[in-house]
Amino acid sequence: MSLGRKSILLVLGPVILTPIILFSPLLLTGKVLFWGTPFLQFTPWRDLAWKEIAAGQLPLWNPQVGMGAPLAANYQSALFYPPNWLLIPLAAAFGPAGIAWGQTLLAVLHIVWAGIGMALLVRRLGLDALAQTAAGLSFSLCGYLVARAGFLSMNAAAAWLPWLLLASYSIAPFGFAHIPERQKSPDFIRILPLAVCIGLLLLAGHAQTAWYLLILLAVWVIFWSAQAGGWRRIGPALAELTGAALAGSLMAAVQLLPTLEYLLQSQRASAVEYAFAMNYSFWPWRFLTLLAPNFFGTPAQGNYWVTADNYWEDAVYVGLMTFVLAAGVAARGFSRKQAALVDDQARVRRGFTRFLAALVLIAFVLALGRYTPIFPFLYRHVPTFAMFQAPTRFSIWAEFGLVMLASMGFDGWRRPWGRGLDWVRRGLVGALAVSAGAGVAYLALRNIELTFIWATALAGLLGAATAGLALTAPRRETAPFSRWHWTVIGVLAVDLLLAGWGLNPGIELQAYRRPAETASELRQELSGRRLFISAADADAIMYGRFFVFKTFDPPNGWQDLRQVYLPNANSLDQIASANNFDPLLPARYVRWMEAVNKTSSAARQQMLAFMNVGLVEVPSAHGRYGVDFIPVSGAARLHWFTCAASAVNEADAWSQTQALFSLDGGLNSRVVLEGDNPDLLPLADCNLTKPAEFRIIKELANQIEIQVNASEPGWLVLADIWYPGWEAAVDGNPVEILRADATFRAVAVPAGEHVVVLRYKPRSFLLGAGLSAATIVLGAVAAVLLLGKRKLNQTG
């Protein structure tokens, strides 16, 4: 084995092994990620997708939540992300339990992938083996990635950051040694790796993270292009970056086009509300956790006491040693003494240091969100800032910047001398004093938070260890992988393991294997109708009883979690729910549900019955599993009208629909149809609705067939959400699906006996799939031809 290959293995060994150790309580005990989104979103989505595939359908529509919602177009479901295809055989063999286990494995593998990418990126910069391993560890096990590991789409997207930058080398070479000249002629092969990385990033399922990483990629390319050849090289590099982004977007079109259609129909079509956008702004006091991650406690130990925000959104720890070295490198980058250095490598290092320091500063300023006037200004005046919540997620730039700064400190780390030696000795004494002071405070100050004590004491010990390593560092360049080298890696790994331990709790596979005990009984009682939980009651059950921010171990445990049918876990037991916990929701559905949650009890009852709600779930101290189910009378999914009102637009339709609440018969008195409907009778001549017979004769996720027998023409209303892509036919003849009561689907049906068929055939998916397939095939053919031509030219 060559020294180079052995060196890579030694560098990557700790980067691969340490995350596995961190997640060993799950991997070695058969437990799986479940806390929050894995249980409420990712597993139900993917379980339903597999069931639709097994039934011979494309997983395009989700009939189990809301009043129907797109499934594949739901961006975070990430059904077209290639690593997620591993879940298909696991779902076939083990059902939801297999999916949950596979998701846990994929989360760990993405963290490992992120660490490998960061180590190779630092290697490409020309830094030494210690810097490579330390950077890989610090990034993969930083608070941002570890605390969010259960947010599977964010975890997958963030892991592509170092690989994007690494792949950009072909269009904007970087490094501290000699930077080669970029080829002047365009070359498809050169941008292909970057295009593939961008495509996979876009398929990973988290739009906010993908957008932030693409911005960072563009800034990275601009910086290194300017370093290599001045401003004249920025334009060509950005042109190639644009080409790679376009190619990557076309590869991901099968996901992007349906999602774009969904976005335009969703509650986020224009902008999210200001309060929602500012949700999860970085709490300024959490800057202290750059030194002591659990200063305010941790839900892993049940002592997180900050009530303003959750733990994981503000998790930014990169390791105390990493942070100290990053701060030292940044300080040297702005010192006058360093500015006097004029050789090329020193110039590039200084420029890169300042670039990274600016990146960290900008990231944290943006992450502060509502705590400064800057983000609110950007929200109001700059596009895309009003599209997402959680400004604190900008801190991924800061995490990356700190790790890269520290990598330059790890590179060639030598024992200090002169004034530097004095400062390190003072730091050692100060760190020990901090730990001792924490001990004194524990004994003397009984009213102080214990989290302050333990976090400060540990930070002092780690600071002392860092100073001790600096005092024992080699005085001159030595062979890599010495005892001191492995001690540094060991201390850093232990620090990061302690910080991340327990942040991703697991649950036994039985929680997914065993159906809810009341599922069969509840399905029989519902008999095709839907379950409903009010917004206040859903929050009380979800956040007050189970997913409590303070602790990962609620007082009454998890044994009843599956028994309460929280959305979207209801679909695991084939219980249809009127609620929907998807990140994107049809705007018409959101408006209807807001009205249901705000209206008086009488109006609410008729709205619930009209939307086919058979049972309302409410928290109850005396109920089975802590909840009761209250029946709703008159619930129906199909409605028949011979009397209709016309509305000129959506706003008019909603206004007229609301007015129906106060009329005799309410929603059942007439239907409000949007658009130009010349066949509608004037309301003055409108007869009472005459009965018709109808029944559902076949239903699949993407299709429903209804038999209708009516004595006169009318409108069949299906209490499912109106959404583009649904097509209808009466006896095989295409007809328009009308918007009913600003929310539902209606089809005009002639008198007599007929079969009405509604199918979901979104053109956005068909076009996206065609573009993705064509791009991948043409790209593969072009790559083979160009590589063959290049090889022929070299041999000739």
Image (cartoon, rainbow, N blue to C red):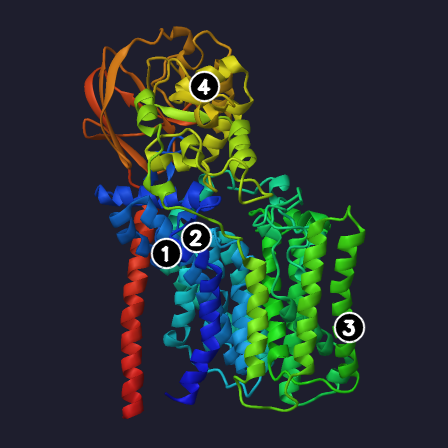
Q: Earlier in the sequence, mark 4 or mark 3?
A: 3
Q: Is residue 175 above or below residue 292?
A: below
Quadrant in the picture for the C terminus: bottom left
Mark 1 vs 2, N-terminal side: 1
Q: Callout 3: few (<14), some (14-19), or many (20+) C-alpha neighbours within 10 Å?
A: some
Check if mark 2's residue and mark 3's residue have beta carbons within 8 Å: no
Q: Which labelled disc corresponds to residue 607? A: 4
| Kind of element beneath mark 3 | helix
Is 251 displayed left or right of 419 in the figure?
A: left
Q: Is residue 434 above or below residue 528?
A: below
Give the residue pinned by disc 2: 205
Camera-side residue: 423 or 768?
423
Taking the image as shown, residue 417 lies to the left or right of residue 522, namely right
Residue 110 pos. (x, y %): 43, 61
Disc 1 + disc 2, Cβ < 8 Å? yes
User: Which residue lies under the disc numbered 1?
Assistant: 81
Image coords of residue 20 (percent x, y): 44, 63
